[in-house]
Amino acid sequence: MTADLNESVKKENIKIHVKGLKKAFGKLEVLKGIDAEITTGEVICVIGPSGSGKSTFLRCINRLEEATGGEILVDGESITDRKADIDRIRQHIGMVFQQFNLFPHYTVKENVMLAPVELKLKSKADAEKKAMELLKRVGLEDKADAKPRQLSGGQQQRVAIARALAMEPDIMLFDEPTSALDPEMVCEVLDVMRELAAEGMTMVIVTHEMGFAHDVADRVFFIDQGIIMEEGTPEQVMDNPQNERTQSFLSKVL
Amino acid sequence: MSLFKVLGEAYPMFLDGLSMTVRITILSLIIALVIGIFVCLMNISNNIVLKSIAKFYIWLIRGTPMLVQAFYFYFAIPQLIQGVTGTQFRIDIFTASLITLAMNAGAYISEIFRGSIEAVNKGQMEAARSLGLSYAKSMQKIILPQAIRICLPSLVNQFIITLKDSTILYAIGLAEIMNKAKVYVGRTMESFATYTWVAIFFLAIVTVLSLVSRTVERRMNS
Ligand SMILES: Nc1ncnc2c1ncn2[C@@H]1O[C@H](COP(=O)(O)OP(=O)(O)OP(=O)(O)O)[C@@H](O)[C@H]1O
Ligand SMILES: [Mg+2]
């Protein structure tokens, strides 16, 4: 009875359920069957060698890549189903890219306001108020009227995070958000992400920042050869890896 | 100097011809822009039929000289229609010229549009879609505004080419500047002066166009 109850409580808390996810580009099999249950508020860091499919895994979660097998449920709803209303589902899954991808023809504030206004979720005035709040939060309220190209990389990435947060997502996906940054700007972006994690956002983060991953992750996924080779707490996976390939990967990056 | 004597004598003819040249160019470019948008949309769509039609059209226009296209629209197609329907069918010179120029420029403009859309960083569409914007909204708000900036120089270049290509229509008898010049030379033998003026007219228009486009570009980029 209690076991059943626990089981159902756990089920309810599963935010992202990945079942046997497969992805091939033509003949190249990149993901060969990924299984994962990510609960609400959990912070997952995904690590692994270059070309192992980390980005592909992340991009399948908001269907920027179409899975070629398996299923992904978000809040119990299949997003891999062809009939799924993907635009609606994406509204509550924020994504931050390695290359920021800010819209260069809009100001910083307009970047942040655009989606809520275009999707008629907020009036212009409300969206603007929210945008200014978010920019303040990432420490960039004074840049509201600047164009993206006038900002440093770290500043651009913080705007990109604010832009994603403007949709009030309950999941945030990060694909190597600091890899394109000069070393001195990495911290300012990681700090914003730490804060988000502390507030209970469900986050999936692909990163090469091992120290950060160790600090912030509830669980770490080591992806290699198209599967999750090893998973567990940072202490388990990073300090005391069991799998030979994890050991060899970590010895190279640490 | 005979240059100015010729201008003084022939300017009413030149003006007539130039006005026709400018009119046919502007009208055909307006139509070509519409053709360009639709053919580009067909070309980038996932519908294999629409895509094939677009590619076939571009292939035809690119692969044939404009002189042949002009003869085709003015002589060949009317004859075909006449043969099929069995009734008298003629197309006037202006219409045939307009179709030729518009179809020709339309194909190139559609390729300019496609190239510009493809030149917008792929990450832009992904960022827009990841926020929950539809494909159409992302195109409208994110991709197209950037593509327009990118395409502007090539578009002006195509306008210039079309303006100059309109002289080819003299061959089917359109009363544009080249045609008027030829008639004038036939009467007076003033080849050098006449064709010098024709060249100067084109240089002047093209120079003004280039200056305007550079100003617009500079304003858009600031
Ligand atoms: N659109 C695509 N078409 C074809 N192959 C692709 C495509 N996207 C990714 N791949 C291939 O899939 C494999 C996994 O790519 P992915 O980007 O997921 O790796 P990654 O783990 O994120 O690597 P990195 O650490 O370098 O970012 C690579 O071999 C890559 O070349
Ligand atoms: Mg990657």
Image (cartoon, coloured by chain):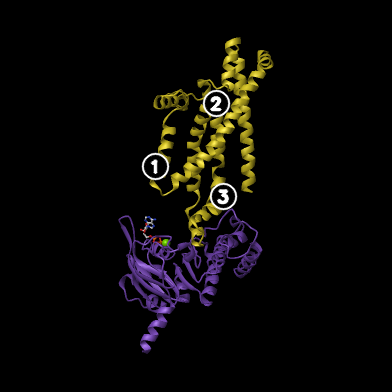
Chain colours: A purple, B yellow
**Do the residues marked 1 and 3 share a common chain?**
yes
Up-down: is A227 above or below B43?
below
Earlier-in-chain disc, 1 versus 2: 1
Front-most of residues A184 and B213: B213
Q: Nearer the viewer, mark 2 or mark 3?
A: 2
In percent of the image, x 62 and y 31: which residue is there?
B207
Q: Give the amino acid type for the residue marked by disc 2 in the picture.
A: Phe
Which residue carries the number 1 mark? B52
Up-down: is B198 above or below A250?
above
Residue B67 placement (x, y as % from top left): 47, 25
Ligand 1 sits in which quadrant? Answer: bottom left
Q: Is residue A181 visible?
A: yes
Front-most of residues B151 and A179: B151
Residue B133 placement (x, y as % from top left): 51, 59
Which residue carries the number 2 mark? B94
Q: Is mark 1 within 8 Å of ligand 1?
A: no
Q: Secondary structure at mark 1?
A: helix
Q: Is mark 2 within 8 Å of ligand 1?
A: no
Up-down: is B73 above or below A147?
above
Q: Give the amino acid type for the residue marked by disc 1 in the picture.
A: Ser
- The alpha-carbon separation of the residues under discs 1 and 3 comes to 27 Å
In percent of the image, x 37 and y 73: which residue is there?
A36
Q: Give the amino acid type for the residue marked by disc 3 in the picture.
A: Pro
